[in-house]
Image (cartoon, coloured by chain):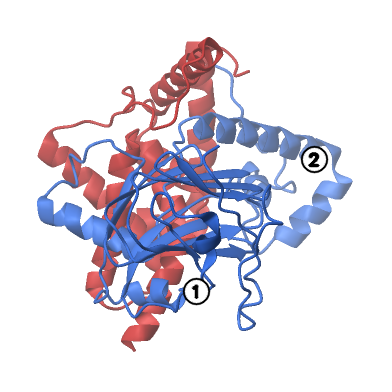
Chain colours: A red, B blue
Amino acid sequence: MAEQFEAELTRLYRVQFPALYRYLDRTLGDSQLATDIAQEAFIRLYDRGSMPDEPVAWLITVVNNLVRDDYRRTGRRLRLLEHAGYNVGHSSTPADAATRVDQQERREQVRAALEHLSPRDRQALLLRHSGYSYREVAVALGITETSVGTILLRAGALFREVYEELHGKPD
Amino acid sequence: MKSYMVSQIDPEHPSDELLLALIHQQPFEASATTREHLQGCASCAARSQALSANDAVIAELLQSLDDPLPVLHPSFAMRHATQLRRAGLIAGAAATMAVAAAAMVPSSPLHRWIAERATSAAPVRLPAAGTSPDTAVTPVPAADVPLASGIAIPAQATLIVAFRREQDGGAVEITRTTTGDVAFRSRGGTTAYEVADGRVTIDNQSPAETYLIDIPASVRQVRVRVGPRTLIRWPEDSARYTLTTDPRRARVDIHTTATSPP
């Protein structure tokens, strides 16, 4: 029984960690914190000792709670306008430096546009574009599956409108 | 502000929500009907194209936020997260993304997942400084030492593995796999890995008995260095000698060469 759970957990980790990390990284703008929180969610699932009915939604709910708790504890607001820095292995040629500046600017523009969305709409948009299905988004956010499409249309439209108002059409 | 949402024109036409669900390949009752409708309705097809294009732009903008995905084996990830939790560092962990450490945790249940993947390909001995290359290929039996968790990184065309320092003994076992990540594990010692741009630095301050490296076929060039020496230069010197192929493991098929300093 325990072995079956571990096998399921391992499979779930391999399939779901990338999407969970991507969602958190986009939400937080901090890759290390995203890694830690995603791993913490799996640790909690491991501690739980059995699979919930909706493991994917369960994981999303856990990470959303961890993010909220983290903000509450640290007084940190969503770091949408803040960039945690690049990670590793950058060369220092001028061309690369220029590319990095462009990437940095683009990131800040995207984060600024995301800030205009309501928390729920932002979560739905980021979850969907991190690879989650409508059903998983609905269960995780406590909304009906049929309303996911409406939220995505609204969130996507506002996100792009704000982005283009602030920064012009994307390249 | 202009809107990218196109209002529903007629109740007989599918709503934007349905079109978007179809674009997102979400299952819904009327999907077949909607697909059929799109084939015969130019205005809805145009709406669908506009929604799809808008969705692609949003996806591209959001992708600009992405940092590289850390690829961690489950056992390592669990252990790492546990350590962080114990230390109360979840919220404030330092942003040293590329540094991963692995040590022996044979009692960890999830560790078995790694252990099951352990291979016993004929190893290339990691010679001490000054040892001739010929002595570097003596197969050694699989050690009865617990296998530690390790790391996995996405495969790139070139892989450089650099041992930070010489060590008196020990071996490198390389398994050529068909697909998957480049994976590193070790037996014995305490090993830390630093990963950056296709280069993995192994901090062998406490030397392991065996280092196991799985290298998928998509990796075309491999360099294994020990301090300033190049131990394995693959495939350039592959004719010099070949690793023994274990018949129970048909995928083990690699040619390695130990060379003098480049």
**Residue at x 39% of width, y 42% of height:** B227
Q: Are marks 2 and 1 on the same chain?
A: yes
Query: What is the quadrant of the C terminus of chain B in the image?
Result: top right
Name the residue tied to disc 2: B45
Q: Is residue B256 above or below residue A74?
A: below
Q: Identify which residue, A169 or B70, lies in the foreground.
A: B70
Instruction: Sort mark 2 into few (<14), some (14-19) or many (20+) by Cα contacts within 10 Å.
Output: some
Disc number placed over residue B119 in the picture, else none: 1
Q: Residue furthest right?
A: B40
Would residue B228 be found to the left or right of residue B160 on screen?
A: left
All told, the count of numbered labels is 2
Q: Spatial distance from mark 2 to mark 1, Cα to Cα?
A: 54 Å
Looking at the picture, how far across and down is residue B163, in whole percent? 39, 47
Local secondary structure at mark 1 = loop
**Residue at x 88% of width, y 47% of height:** B40
Q: Identify which residue, B245 or B1, lies in the foreground.
A: B245
Of all chains, the one bearing label 2 is B
**Residue at x 57% of width, y 58% of height:** B215
Looking at the picture, how far across and down is residue A21, in whole percent? 40, 48
Instruction: Sort mark 1 into few (<14), some (14-19) or many (20+) by Cα contacts within 10 Å.
Output: some
Q: Specify the quadrant of the image occupied by residue A116.
A: top left
Would residue B13 be found to the left or right of residue B78 on screen?
A: right
Q: Specify the quadrant of the image occupied by residue B92.
A: top left
Q: Identify which residue, A36 or A170, lies in the foreground.
A: A36
Residue type at tag 2: Ala
Local secondary structure at mark 2 = helix
Query: What is the quadrant of the N terminus of chain B in the image?
Result: top right
Disc number placed over residue A17 in the picture, else none: none
